[in-house]
Image (cartoon, rainbow, N blue to C red):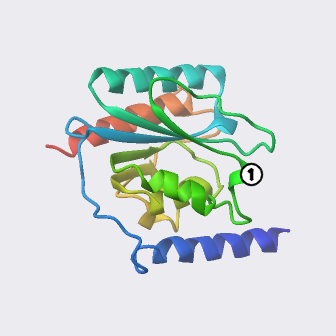
Amino acid sequence: MKWISRIKERYSKERIRNLDDIGTHYQRDFIDIEKAKRIGIIVNMNQCTNDDLKLIYAYIDALREKKKQILVIELNFLKKSIPELSGAFDSIFINPANLNWLDYPTPAIEKKIQKFDLDILIDFDHSDRMTAKYVCSMARAKTRTGMHTEGFEGCYELMIKPKDADVNGYNGEPKLKNMIKEFDYFLNMIGY
């Protein structure tokens, strides 16, 4: 089964790299978080603890207080999963019923995502799944941010690679909390 995974990864890297070449690209730019009006967040629910969910809601509330429009793209790779994130923000739910064999969203979900014209898209999914990377590649977002993943540099304008990353987080704090801090820090630095 490893050979299938390698083929999928190789094909995905090539497909994602070529998205811009076939005319599906969108004007990219570096937008700082203070000037951004529309912010998208990708969250993999399979990686979230209850504390992570609280952090996500707190971050969304902080952005909304600054008059930002929020789109949450919720990923859940369990077959019979249901949406868990809801609130006074737009959301798109993606589970296995909405994915093809490469973990790419179906055309109907792609159209929903592309309806949103985002200033910033923040990818909090640090898994090896292709879904978030593909969504970042095809989304109408000026600045796309995510964790550094070798071979997927074309998916993002800003990639962050923490120094002491491990399974439990780094610097003694949960991974999501540090991701939020680092993305926020660098997205604020763009304007300077």
User: Tag 1: Cα neighbours inside 10 Å, few (<14), some, or many (≥20)?
Assistant: few
Secondary structure of residue under mark 1: helix
The reply, left or right, for residue 110 in relation to residue 118 is: right
Hey, which residue is sitting farthest left in the picture? 192
Out of 117 and 169, give the one closest to the viewer: 117
Left or right, 68 with reference to 134 = left
Residue beneath the point at 65% across and 36% down: 45
Q: Quadrant of the C terminus?
A: top left
Identify which residue is drawn at 28% across, 64% down: 27
Q: Is the residue 92 above or below the residue 103 in the image?
A: above
- Give the image location of residue 146, x and y in percent: 45, 49
Measured from the top left, where is residue 26 in percent x and y? 33, 65
Quadrant occupied by the N terminus = bottom right
Q: Residue at x 32, y 40 (%)?
A: 38
Residue 142: image location, x then y, percent: 30, 55
- Residue 93 on image: x %, y %: 61, 42
The residue pinned by badge 1 equals: 97
Whether residue 160 is visible, yes or no, is no
Residue type at mark 1: give it: Ala
Residue 7 versus residue 183 in the image, above or below? below
Q: Would you say 31 lies left or right of 89 here? A: left
Q: How many marks?
A: 1
Any part of residue 118 in sight: yes
Q: Quadrant of residue 71?
A: top left
Q: In the picture shown, does residue 145 fall above or below 80?
A: below
